[in-house]
Amino acid sequence: MFEVIYKYLLIVFLILLLVLISYTGYIFIFGQIDSYIISIHKISGILLIFVALVHTIIKRKKLKKLTKEFLNIFLGKKVSLDSDMDLLLDSLQSKTLDEICVIFNLTFKELEQLFEKNNIIYSSKEQTLHELSKNSSYKVFPIIVKIIEYKSK
């Protein structure tokens, strides 16, 4: 809970300091320069740099991942999916319903009952999860979750 609060406050401070610097800069454009406004502008700038550094330190893993992905795209290399969930979805969405039964140790009858219970419409055993998700109101991930939930009972 504390983590959510300080991350939220960090974002609020970033936005507030950006608005404050913009406002004092706007005042400078119209020639209303005095020592009070200059002090507010300087203090806001210093605080903005500090808060931005703290934000960068907190988000360093995400920044590192985004930088790596950007460089891979820029250099024309294959973008790797680091998320286990992305890898799972990627590996299962091209599988047929028959193969899904084998992977999750289900009979096709059990899978039919699960689909019927959740109003998931399929046309044949040879249909892939990707095709199934296009034809029903479910995406691939919720279908996999429902199968896993069924198996965990």
Image (cartoon, helix red, strand yellow):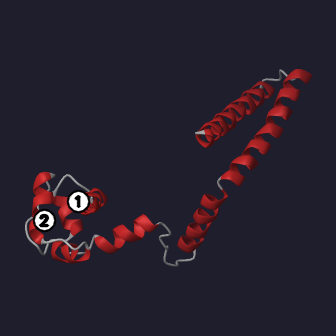
Residue under circle 1? 150
Is residue 72 shown left or right of residue 12?
A: left
Whether 56 is drawn above or below 20: the answer is below
Q: In front here: 147 or 71?
A: 147
Which residue of the protein is positioned furthest toward the front in this rendering?
153
Q: In front here: 31 or 65?
A: 65
State which tag comes first along the sequence, 1 or 2: 2
Residues at circles 1 and 2 in contact by the CB criterion of under 8 Å = yes
Which numbered disc covers residue 110?
2
Residue 114 image position (x, y, % from top left): 15, 58
Say whether residue 121 is visible: no
Residue 91 image position (x, y, % from top left): 34, 74
Q: Estimate how packed mark 1 is, as few (under 14), some (14 to 19) or many (20 or more) residues with alpha carbons within 10 Å.
A: few
User: Which amino acid lies under the numbered mark 1 shown in the image of this protein?
Assistant: Tyr
Q: CA distance from mark 1 to mark 2?
A: 9 Å
Which numbered disc covers residue 139?
none
User: Which amino acid lies under the numbered mark 2 shown in the image of this protein?
Assistant: Glu
- Give the position of the C terminus as an image quadrant: bottom left
Residue 70 image position (x, y, % from top left): 57, 67
- Give the position of the N terminus as an image quadrant: top right
